Image: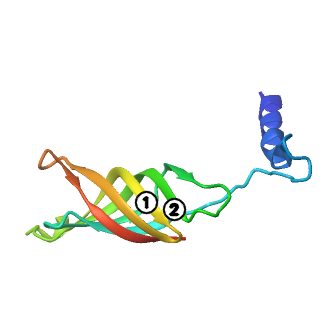
Amino acid sequence: MPKKIIISFLCVLFSNFVQAQDKPNEIKAVNWTIGGQITLSSDFKDNIFLNFAGPGLKLSDKSKKNPWALSINMFPSMRCNMQEKDSNKIFTPILGTGFQVFYKKFVISMPAYYLASQNIWVGTLGVGYSF
C-alpha cells in the first residue's frame, strides 16, 4: 500500500516535465492554476443570489488569443429572499447549476436553483468578475 502511494505521488510530481513530440523546439508542460469568480445574479422577482465559483468544466482557447470562454459549473450561493417575513430565513445557502460565459475577466452567469419549499426551479441571470 505505501508503495502505491509513493509511486502515485512521484507520477504527479514529475507530470510537469511531460513534453509533446510534435515540436521538439517547444517545451510543453502541464499548467496548474487556481481560479475563481464571484457573481451576483437575480431572478428579477424576489431573490438575489451571491454566487461563488464551484467545480465545473471550462472550454477555452489554449493559445490565449481568444478572450472568450464557456463553462458549466456548480454554484455554491447565498440566497437573499427579499419578501421573506421571518428574519431568520432572509439569507439561506443554496447550490445551483448552470452556464457561464467569460470575456477576459468579466463573467455572465446563468445558474438555475431548485427551491424545495416551492417545488420549482428558478432560472437567474448575473454578472461578475473572475480572478
Residue at 37% over, 61% down: 109
Horizontal side of 45 relative to 26 (left or right) equals left
Query: Along the polypeptide, which appears first: circle 2 or circle 1?
Result: 2
Q: Residue furthest top?
A: 1
Sort mark 1 into few (<14), some (14-19) or many (20+) by Cα contacts within 10 Å.
Answer: some
Residues at badges 2 and 1 in contact (C-beta under 8 Å)? yes
Mark 2 vs mark 1, foreground winner is 2
Q: Point out the image quarter for the C terminus.
A: bottom right
Horizontal side of 46 relative to 77 (left or right) equals left
Horizontal side of 13 relative to 107 (left or right) equals right
Residue at 68% over, 58% down: 63
Q: Residue 121 shows which numbered tag?
A: none
Residue at 80% over, 51% down: 29
Q: Point out the image quarter for the N terminus.
A: top right
Sort mark 2 into few (<14), some (14-19) or many (20+) by Cα contacts within 10 Å.
Answer: some
Where residue 127 sits: x, y (%)?
Answer: 36, 70
Horizontal side of 107 relative to 18 (left or right) equals left
Secondary structure under tag 2 reads strand
Q: Residue furthest left?
A: 85
How is the protein colored in the picture? rainbow
Where residue 123 sits: x, y (%)?
Answer: 23, 55
Q: Residue 68 shows which numbered tag?
A: 2
Alpha carbons under labels 2 and 1: distance apart:
7 Å
Q: Amino acid at mark 1?
A: Val
Secondary structure under tag 1 reads strand
Where residue 52 sits: x, y (%)?
Answer: 42, 63
Q: Residue furthest right?
A: 25
Where residue 65 sits: x, y (%)?
Answer: 64, 64
Q: Nearer the viewer, residue 84 or 18?
A: 18
The residue labelled by disc 1 is 101
Q: Amino acid at mark 2?
A: Trp
Q: Nearer the viewer, residue 98 or 117?
A: 98
